[in-house]
Image (cartoon, rainbow, N blue to C red):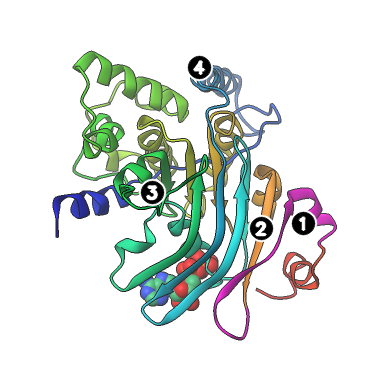
Amino acid sequence: MSTSERRGRETATIETAQTGIADGRGMAPASASPAEMAQAAQEKAQVREVIEQKAGGGVSLVAEGVNAWYGSTHAIKDVSMTFRANEVTALIGPSGCGKSTFLRCLNRMHEVLAGARVEGKILIDGQDIYGKGVDSVRVRRHIGMVFQKPNPFPMMSIYDNVIAGLKLNGIRKRKSEMDETVEHSLRGAALWNEVKDKLKESGASLSGGQQQRLCIARTIAVEPEVVLMDEPCSALDPISTYKIEELIGELKQKYTIAIVTHNMQQASRVADWTSFMLAGDAGYGQLVEYGRTEQIFTQPQDKRTEDYITGRFG
Ligand SMILES: Nc1ncnc2c1ncn2[C@@H]1O[C@H](COP(=O)(O)OP(=O)(O)OP(=O)(O)O)[C@@H](O)[C@H]1O
Ligand SMILES: [Mg+2]
């Protein structure tokens, strides 16, 4: 394996997560004490500060006729969709319909699997990420990803986890600049207050919800434009889920966000746009319907969407 392929694979393990609501409820759950409420308000102000520095920084991502295969298995067929700048798009659909496959096509992670193949176009700000001469490692820097299971590097400290993506991308900074990036990223992921006194401790020492926010910080640290999240809350308790959802609502001001979720309430809470995918009898997944989240959940145009959101199958 060449160095660039190896680095591509390493980068492919790097994730980020965000999911969100911007309804002003703050980071604290309803049952929070006054001290927790104050802490939550402080965290929220910090996240806002980080966001405001680069508000509107997301770019649109457009998928045109995307097909993906695993060997001879045709997993998704002709999927076209737009992920609008600074908005959240949710991908929903039954297990096996190709949501994760499609998401991995969006930042060239699908191709790292042996025998995997992609056809079609993915345009970021008009440029095809599958174009001739485009470096997949650079693509993944601009289009970050957060996975279902928080996966900080267990042998690395919290500090080193945040800057891991920078190192993989060959970005060098002075120590003081690195310190700044670490603080800025952890604040942006609403984790700074909880870890600022133990940055040298292992990333594995954090709770699941904190680890997921650490993974978000790691993604933010490389300053992507787009953040892809594959069921980022499915391994988290309700309070951690709430925090991540809240965070997504804040982060979309800076990033363009795509989130796969099995949780319909989550999709309706965090997403501006929702797309419903389904695998038919032929086996491959296709896009059935795409629209404003409210429309998809209240006035679906396709009977299959209606059946799915009302729990008749899937
Ligand atoms: N590594 C792989 N090798 C071969 N086939 C795969 C691989 N990963 C996924 N598939 C197949 O591709 C299809 C789509 O899978 P994918 O994981 O994208 O679905 P999904 O919608 O994300 O499902 P879930 O909701 O369960 O996560 C499935 O038929 C699956 O079996
Ligand atoms: Mg999946």
Q: Which dot, 3 or 4, sits closer to the camera?
A: 4
Q: Tags 3 and 4 in contact by the CB under 8 Å rule?
A: no
Instruction: Examine the structure image and report whether residue 36 is included in the region drawn in magenta.
Output: no
Q: Is residue 72 visible?
A: yes
Residue 12: x %, y % from top left = 32, 52
Please tell me which of labels 4 and 2 falls first in the chain.
4
Specify the farthest residue to the bottom: 281
Query: Which residue carries the number 1 mark?
Result: 296
Q: Quadrant of residue 164?
A: top left
Task: Name the amino acid, label 3.
Answer: Pro
Q: Are marks 1 and 4 in contact (CB under 8 Å)?
A: no
Magenta region, residue range: 280-300
Q: Position of residue 106 (x, y in %)?
A: 46, 54
Gap between marks 3 and 4, in whole Å? 27 Å
Where is residue 263 drawn, in percent x and y?
63, 57
Cα distance between the residues tagged 1 and 4 = 33 Å
Q: Residue tagged by mark 3?
A: 150
Q: Give the amino acid type for the residue marked by disc 4 in the picture.
A: Gln
